[in-house]
């Protein structure tokens, strides 16, 4: 072998192991995991978790909160410094409490994904004593033809819970929305990404390259819904109406949402999580939310949580419509209000350290 090839191989090996040190932490996690990188490669979550684990260990953190959920907890359509985790830290700091909040939510994450992230946290020794999970009404709706219960992290389910994988494998693989390796080549690539840092960081580097080139332009339309004239008509489309279906919820384990909630609560019984039903724009969706079937379904969810090892809050109608950008997503001020509600609830149940002020 020529010396040139030897130098090339050594260079690549050094690059592999040094890449994690060369990539700025903020590219992987800055108040949340960048969605553009995550959707390109959901394994970006593992890079962020490694980074968070290192921060917790280096700084000896004990008073921190983990946020899990979907686009509401992620805090779209605003930027990272308009997100729930950012506001929680700012509000806590104003009260004299040094609090860290790690937001691992992503748009379209389902309860099955949350269950898998919980496993990843525990395998790394990251405490889930202060765990907050958001749910949406749509998650309980019949999933036939809709999103699979594991949307992003299907490749991890078999390892995390073989029984659950056996039960839901077909629905996950057959649903084109699911992010899962379906062919031997895809499974090989998924395995290589876990072993080869250069491949693991590819989504992060690609997102940054496109950002520098101008291909990724973050446009945060955080205007209130009243400034979007076409929104009421858009909400009449089937995909949105389906999310507010008044058909009776199946609140047994036959409903994948309920099944995975039971699995989550079984794993967190030692430190019950705060789980809240996310706010809905009661004015924009008035026709839907006023339906007797919709209201009956809300009561069914409330009843299911009674006696469960969780701190449950139904905040479905807790916010005024002026804090919404659409049917469920909030303005930055709305997310700040929601952040305050979460903090207050954690304080009420004694989940946070006493303020130093």
Image (cartoon, rainbow, N blue to C red):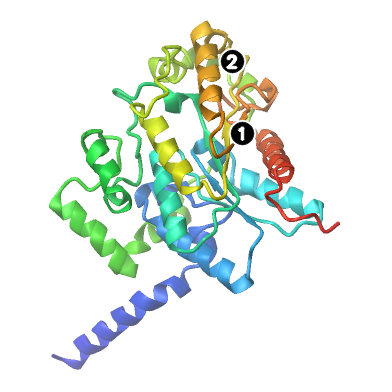
Q: Identify the residue under disc 2.
A: 284
Q: Is residue 265 left or right of residue 315?
A: left
Q: Is residue 62 left or right of residue 300?
A: right
Residue visible at 64% across and 33% down in the picture? 331
Task: Sort mark 1 into few (<14), some (14-19) or many (20+) by Cα contacts within 10 Å.
Answer: many
Of the pair 56 and 308, the residue shown nearer to us: 308
Task: Sort mark 2 into few (<14), some (14-19) or many (20+) by Cα contacts within 10 Å.
Answer: some
Residue visible at 29% across and 79% down in the picture? 12
Q: Identify the residue under disc 1.
A: 222
Location of the C terminus by quadrant is: bottom right
Q: Position of residue 162 (x, y in %)?
A: 26, 48
**Quarter of image, res 219:** top right
Q: Position of residue 173 (x, y in %)?
A: 22, 38
Vertically, is 198 above or below 286? below
For the residue labelled by badge 2, is the local secondary structure a helix, a strand or a loop? loop
Location of the N terminus by quadrant is: bottom left
């Amino acid at each position: 072998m020529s010396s040139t090839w030897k130098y090339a191989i050594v260079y690549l090996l050094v690059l592999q192991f040094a890449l994690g040190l060369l990539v700025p932490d903020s590219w992987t996690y800055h108040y949340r995991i960048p969605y553009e990188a995550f959707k390109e490669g959901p394994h970006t979550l593992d890079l962020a978790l490694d980074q968070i684990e290192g921060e917790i260990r280096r700084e000896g953190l004990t008073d921190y909160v983990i946020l899990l959920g979907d686009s509401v907890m992620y805090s779209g359509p605003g930027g990272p410094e308009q997100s729930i985790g950012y506001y929680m830290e700012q509000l806590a700091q104003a009260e004299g409490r040094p609090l860290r909040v790690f937001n691992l939510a992503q748009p379209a994450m389902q309860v099955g994904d949350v269950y898998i992230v919980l496993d990843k946290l525990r395998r790394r020794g990251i405490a889930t004593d202060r765990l907050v999970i958001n749910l949406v009404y749509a998650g309980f709706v019949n999933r036939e033809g809709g999103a699979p219960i594991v949307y992003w992290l299907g490749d991890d389910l078999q390892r995390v819970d073989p029984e659950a994988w056996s039960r839901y494998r077909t629905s996950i693989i057959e649903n084109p929305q699911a992010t899962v390796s379906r062919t031997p080549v895809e499974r090989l690539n998924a395995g290589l990404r876990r072993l080869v840092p250069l491949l693991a960081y590819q989504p992060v580097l690609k997102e940054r390259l496109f950002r520098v080139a101008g291909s990724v332009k973050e446009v945060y339309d955080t205007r209130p819904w009243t400034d979007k004239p076409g929104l009421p008509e858009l909400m009449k489309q089937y995909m949105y109406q389906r999310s507010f279906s008044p058909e009776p919820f199946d609140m047994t384990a036959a409903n994948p949402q309920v099944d995975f909630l039971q699995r989550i609560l079984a794993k967190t019984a030692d430190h019950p999580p705060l789980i809240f039903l996310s706010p809905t724009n009661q004015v924009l969706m008035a026709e839907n939310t006023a339906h007797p079937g919709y209201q009956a379904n809300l009561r069914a969810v409330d009843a299911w949580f009674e006696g469960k090892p969780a701190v449950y809050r139904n905040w479905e109608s807790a916010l005024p419509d002026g804090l919404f950008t659409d049917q469920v997503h909030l303005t930055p001020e709305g997310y700040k209000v929601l952040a305050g509600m979460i903090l207050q609830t954690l304080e009420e149940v004694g989940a946070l350290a006493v303020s130093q002020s």
